[in-house]
Image: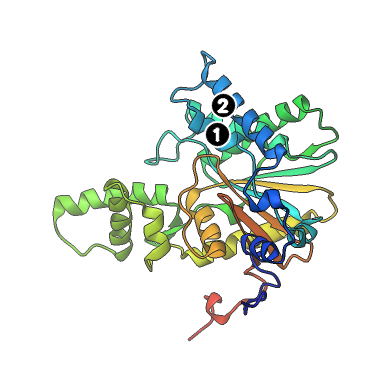
């Protein structure tokens, strides 16, 4: 088996690279036997203790459990081989963070009390991995739930940095950025996110049902199918990822939109050292970015769960980590095939 693969990567993904190094005998016996390093064991214990402590506080949010808490306090447990670690030096650390628990998706609602707690807790947890003299930029999508999540993370960050005595940190106030909006739906000449599209769909569908006359526009049928998947207990985002839809923004376009935003932020802040980008957005685009990297849909992120991206200093390659799996990728906006130029005439 060749150690090189016929693709655009210069190295195998992190998990495969470790396998190759294990075959060559470059991995310690403790790693081969699966024994966890002591720092991981300590981190796991601290995460569990903090989660259990939160459950015992009388005024903690409702429905609290160790499972809810673990999402925001559990440690990153991937141990990268030296070949990957060398590439990661001086990389830019980015988190695509799903918003906290929302009051509902029928309107552009804010967060519940639990969602605010999740956001604050996420900020505290992120503070533990920040170095002195870091520059943190907070970005959010143009929805109430994403904005409240960003401000909750900001509060948690400030509290955590003070608790851990991390000094000389520059944190920008959260700002909205169009690149990181939710997937869009073309509704009768207007671009709307799925929540806003549902409101218009619900009003018009009632009229069509009442009159029982006229042909329904195509976008109305697609929104109808999308929300019926949700109503039936299915996964509408999985439906969007796998079903060619004519009135929904395609997943590949969403992925490229996100990457353009990431690279723009990096270039705009190239003079800042130890740059961190925390981007509060929605599950659909996050899943699309992760799916494009790992080659399959890894599933719905929990509230405040994140996809972590480390962009290498060449701005051409990155390491994407989600749920214990890391994959090295070529950033997909380096080249632009003709089919991405939607304005090109036939």
Of all residues, the one furthest to the top in this rendering is 58
- Residue 25, image x, y percentages: 72, 62
In the rendered structure, which disc, 2 or 1, sits on the residue that comes first in sequence?
2
Q: Residue at x 51, y 84 (%)?
A: 345
Using a 10 Å C-alpha cutoff, classify the residue at mark 2 as few (fewer than 14 neighbours), some (14 to 19) or many (20 or more). many
**Residue at the image position 77 percent from the left and 58 percent from the top:** 82
Q: Secondary structure at mark 1?
A: helix
Q: Are marks 2 and 1 in contact (CB under 8 Å)?
A: yes
Circle 1 Cα neighbour tier, 10 Å, few/some/many (<14 / 14–19 / ≥20):
some
Residue 220, picture quadrant:
bottom left
Is 17 or 250 nearer to us in this picture?
Answer: 17
> Relative to residue 267, is residue 36 depicted above or below?
above
- Write down the residue under mark 2: 51
Picture residue at 51% right of the left edge, 65% below the top: 295
Q: Is residue 341 left or right of residue 83?
A: left
Instruction: Answer whether residue 182 is visible to the viewer in this image.
Output: yes
């Amino acid at each position: 088996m060749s150690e090189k693969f016929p693709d655009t990567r210069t190295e195998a993904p992190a998990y495969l690279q470790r396998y190759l190094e294990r075959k060559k005998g470059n991995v310690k016996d403790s790693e081969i036997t699966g024994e966890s390093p002591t720092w991981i064991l300590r981190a796991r214990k601290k995460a569990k203790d903090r989660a259990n402590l939160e459950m015992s506080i009388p005024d903690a949010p409702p429905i609290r459990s160790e499972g809810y808490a673990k999402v925001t306090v559990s440690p990153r447990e991937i141990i990268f081989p030296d070949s990957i670690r060398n590439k990661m030096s001086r990389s830019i650390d980015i988190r695509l963070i799903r918003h906290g628990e929302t009051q509902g998706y029928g309107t552009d609602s804010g967060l519940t009390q639990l969602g605010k707690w999740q956001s604050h807790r996420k900020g505290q947890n992120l503070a533990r991995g920040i170095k002195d003299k870091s520059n943190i930029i907070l970005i959010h999508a143009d929805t109430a739930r994403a904005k409240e999540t960003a401000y909750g993370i900001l509060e948690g960050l400030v509290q955590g940095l003070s608790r851990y005595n991390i000094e000389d940190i520059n944190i920008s106030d959260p700002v909205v950025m169009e690149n990181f909006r939710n997937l869009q739906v073309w509704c009768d000449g207007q671009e709307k996110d799925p929540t806003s599209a549902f409101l218009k769909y619900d009003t018009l569908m009632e009229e069509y049902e009442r009159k029982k006359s006229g042909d329904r526009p195509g976008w109305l049928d697609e929104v109808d199918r999308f929300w019926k998947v949700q109503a039936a207990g299915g996964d509408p985002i999985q439906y969007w990822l796998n079903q060619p839809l004519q009135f929904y923004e395609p997943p590949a376009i969403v992925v490229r939109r996100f990457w353009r935003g990431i690279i723009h932020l990096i270039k705009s802040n190239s003079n800042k050292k130890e740059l961190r980008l925390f981007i509060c957005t929605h599950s659909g685009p996050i899943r699309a970015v992760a799916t494009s990297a790992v080659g399959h849909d890894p599933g719905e992120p929990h509230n405040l769960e994140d996809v972590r991206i480390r962009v290498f200093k060449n701005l051409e390659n990155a390491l994407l980590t989600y749920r214990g799996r890391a994959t090295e990728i070529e950033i997909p906006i380096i080249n632009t095939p003709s089919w991405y130029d939607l304005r090109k005439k036939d």
